[in-house]
Amino acid sequence: MGHYTNLTDPRTELEVVRDWNGVEQVVLRSPRGAYARVSLHGGQVLSWRNDRGEELLFTSSKAIFKPPKAMRGGIPICFPQFGNSGTLEQHGFARNRIWAIDEGHPPLNQNDNSSKASVDLILKPSEDDLKYWPHCFEFRLRISLSMDGDLSLVSRVRNVNGKPFSFSFGYHTYLSVSDISEVRIEGLETLDYLDNLSQRERFTEQGDAITFESEVDRAYVGSPNVIAVLDHEKKRTFVIRKEGLPDIVVWNPWEKKSKTMVDFGDEEYKQMLCVDAAATERPITLKPGEEWTGKLELSEVPSTNCSGHLDQPGII
Ligand SMILES: O=P(O)(O)OC[C@H]1O[C@H](O)[C@H](O)[C@@H](O)[C@@H]1O
């Protein structure tokens, strides 16, 4: 990471660094020391650290930081297709495009009583994109770090087309965990899920909480807006709040699949878990002029303090 050059963008006052491919990355800092870094490649959050400097998102040691592929880790934005159940490339093209800083929406760091550090990004389709997906859209993404170090992502997709269009979507969130066998998810019990490992066959979750002992690739449909990922060994809980996104996709490649992925270490499945707030079972349809909003908020809390989080509404 020593290749960065730091500068402050005079137009937006944002702290911007350039990676070794020349792609800009925006740095967000909370007054208490939490940190996030966002690449304009994909609008992807690459790093989220708490105020003790601990990294909370997983990045593979074999990740390839080179467009046009999304880096393996952080939070890739999957749009306008989540997964491979459509005509586009896996997870759509947004994660492989260079986004722009949306100067029409100045950041809220200054003189803002919510005390959030934030950046506004925008993606519009290129002529090439329109050949494969002939729908004009404006995708605005606001990424914020709160005073307490919570990370929030708000996506707004507007139809600026003459005709309706549909899309699926996901915040493909790579959480960093101590050891996958020590992790459980609460909030998905008794839900139906589509199993991507059995041609999206529908099953009903039977367990009390979700734990991991083999490959998992499931879309839990119609999930609550608040769920928790408990890391027993780290005594840390991630609270995931979402709005406008009905589903939660849970993915861990486990041992065999890890070995087939060039940008992922053979043993790294033990240190990660993807828990993605998504709209995947039913596509979202926008009429001309309509806008859709999908929100994700991630908090990290000590496990002893996590009880009660699941009762709170998912308001960001
Ligand atoms: O390798 P990628 O294209 O980034 O996808 C990684 C994974 O993303 C999601 O979790 C999907 O449900 C999985 O089926 C897929 O394997």
Image (cartoon, grey):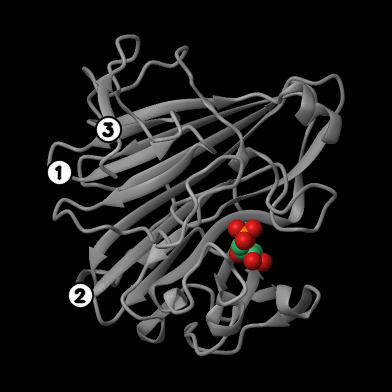
Residue 175 visible in the snapshot = yes
Task: Please tell me which residue is depicted at 28% across the width and 81% down the height of the picture.
Answer: 232
Query: How packed is label 1: few (under 14 Cα within 10 Å), some, or many (20 or more)?
Result: some
Q: Which tag, 2 or 3, sits closer to the chain's start?
A: 3
Q: Where is residue 201 in the image (x, y as percent from the top left)?
A: 79, 78
Tag 1: residue type? Gly
Q: Where is residue 260 in the image (x, y as percent from the top left)?
A: 62, 74
Give SS at disc 1: loop
Q: Position of residue 225 (x, y in %)?
A: 50, 58
Q: Mark 2 points at which residue?
A: 304
Task: Please tell me which residue is depicted at 76% across the width and 54% down the height of the picture.
Answer: 282
Tag 3: residue type? Lys
The quarter of the picture where residue 203 lies is: bottom right
Query: How packed is label 3: few (under 14 Cα within 10 Å), some, or many (20 or more)?
Result: many
Task: Please tell me which residue is depicted at 50% across the width and 52% down the height of the picture.
Answer: 64
- Residue 168 relative to residue 60: left or right: right
Q: In this view, does 259 lie above or below 134?
A: below
Decide which of 38, 148 is in the foreground and name it: 38
Q: Which of marks 2 and 1 is in front?
A: 1
What whole-number distance in Å separates the C-alpha atoms at marks 2 and 1? 23 Å
Does mark 3's beta carbon lie closer than 8 Å to ligand 1?
no
Q: Where is residue 144 in the image (x, y as percent from the top left)?
A: 35, 36
Q: In which quarter of the image is the N terminus?
A: top left
Q: Which of marks 3 and 1 is in front?
A: 1
Does mark 2's beta carbon lie closer than 8 Å to ligand 1?
no
Q: Name the residue under label 1.
A: 33
